Amino acid sequence: MNRLIAGQLNRCLAGLSLQQQRNIHLTPLQSSVFTKKIKKLDPALAKMREERKRNKLTKEIRSMQKHSKKPKPLDEMYIDVISSRNLNERSRTIAHLPFEELERRALVHKQYSTDRTRLCARDQQHISSVLRLQTSALAALKGVSEELYQAAIQPDPTLVPSTYHGPPETPPIDNYESPDGDYVDTTRMWE
């Protein structure tokens, strides 16, 4: 009998809660999106407000761009206090050269440019004549002996020393699946 009473008491207590019950009721009007009556605006006034917002945004963008272009300050660009006090002592006067000296310097510069141009042309002629003689010598050597020709066109290993470590190309990996864009879609879908 005691068991029966204890079981019924447990069932009754299971539905009870010690927390306070909050009675919140929502009316259809309050849960609506629009709680106020919408006023009809004049289209010209709405357009003016939109234009003001747009102008304000463009002004902010312009000011942001203006401030973004400012370079970082460099300590070398600023003059210290001691140096700024004696700027007159540190300034130099520009030396004005006489006309004859300017003419002499211009003539020297012109002669130097002419000599460098001649030297460059002479070098180009020398290189082209050496290449022409080399190709004719190789053609004559090929006519005499093919073995000597093959030995002559081989690169000289002592001319440019170079060492290689490992194979120049790696062998392919067995059973390698290349990422060619195909994939298995593992996205979970809930419907």
Image: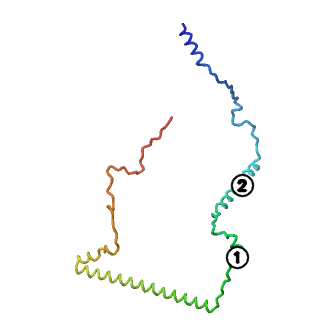
Q: Say which element carries label 2.
A: helix
Q: Quadrant of residue 171?
A: bottom left
Q: Which mark is residue 172?
A: none
Q: Pinpoint residue 22: horizontal percent, then vertical percent.
A: 68, 26
Residue at image position (63%, 67%) is: 75
N-terminal-most mark, 1 or 2 = 2
Residue 46 position (above or below residue 103) = above
How packed is label 2: few (under 14 Cα within 10 Å), some, or many (20 or more)? few
Snapshot colouring? rainbow
Asked whether disc 1 touches disc 2, contact meaning CB atoms under 8 Å apart, the reply is no
Q: Give the amino acid at mark 2.
A: Lys
Q: Which mark is drawn over residue 56?
A: 2
Residue 169: x %, y % from top left: 33, 60
| Residue count near mark 1 (Cα–Cα under 10 Å), binned few <14, some 14–19, many ≥20 | few
Q: Which residue is label 1 attached to?
A: 87
Question: In this image, 47 relative to 73: left or right?
Answer: right
Residue displayed at 70% across by 57% down: 59
Which residue is depicted at the point 68% across and 83% down? 93
Towards the viewer: 62 or 46: 62
Mark 1 and mark 2: Cα distance apart in space:
45 Å
Residue type at mark 1 is Leu
Task: Using the image, determine if residue 23 lies above or below residue 32.
Answer: above
Image coordinates of residue 73 in percent, x first then y, are: 64, 64
Q: Residue at x 62, y 92 (%)?
A: 100
- Relative to residue 136, is residue 68 drawn left or right? right
**As rendered, which of 99 and 134 lies closer to the eye?**
99
Local secondary structure at mark 1: helix
**Outermost residue to the top:** 1
Query: Which picture quadrant has residue 133?
Result: bottom left
